[in-house]
Image (cartoon, rainbow, N blue to C red):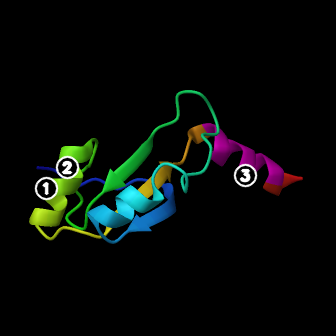
Amino acid sequence: MDKITFNGELLITLDSKQDWINKIPRHLPAKEYYKEDFLWLDKNDNQLVMGEDFMAAEEMNSYPVKIYRLQRVVDVRKEVTDGES
């Protein structure tokens, strides 16, 4: 499988399934736009999308899980435009 890179903001790090139960969803920030998705990756860069993934991650010792907000192209354009002023 190919390795990829991405630009994003780290929002939260979860150290266990119990940490996931305790923190999610109330510690996640509000979405900035209606179709925004967060990317959830374990320490092996595998994605988590539902409860069974968090249980499997615990069994496989693949915590911590990091949650990212992916950077949008329009946000980069705003940074560049603002920097030109």
31 shown above or below 4: above
Going by the picture, which residue comes out furthest to the top? 34
Tally the marks. Answer: 3
Mark-to-mark CA distance, 3 and 2: 35 Å
Which residue is found at the position 18% from the left and 67% from the top?
A: 62
Residue under pointer 1: 56
Q: Position of residue 33 (x, y in %)?
A: 63, 32
Mark-to-mark CA distance, 3 and 1: 39 Å
Q: Position of residue 64 (x, y in %)?
A: 30, 70
Q: Is residue 17 left or right of residue 70?
A: left
In the image, which residues are magenta?
74-82
Mark-to-mark CA distance, 1 and 2: 5 Å
Q: In which image quadrant can residue 43 be found?
A: bottom left
Circle on res. 22: none
Q: Position of residue 50 (x, y in %)?
A: 27, 41
Q: Earlier in the sequence, mark 3 or mark 2?
A: 2
Residue under pointer 2: 53
Q: Position of residue 25 (x, y in %)?
A: 49, 48
Circle on res. 79: 3
Which residue is found at the position 13% from the left and 55% from the top?
A: 56
The three-letter code of the residue at mark 1 reads: Ala
Q: Nearer the viewer, mark 3 or mark 2?
A: 2
Give whichever of 78, 55 is nearer the camera: 55
The three-letter code of the residue at mark 2 reads: Asp
Q: In which image quadrant can residue 38 be found?
A: top left
Q: Are marks 3 and 1 in contact (CB under 8 Å)?
A: no
In magenta segment, residue 57: no
- Please, what is the dominant secondary structure of the magenta stretch? helix
Task: Bin the neighbour count of mark 2 within 10 Å (Cα to Cα): few under 14, some 14-19, many 20 and up.
Answer: some
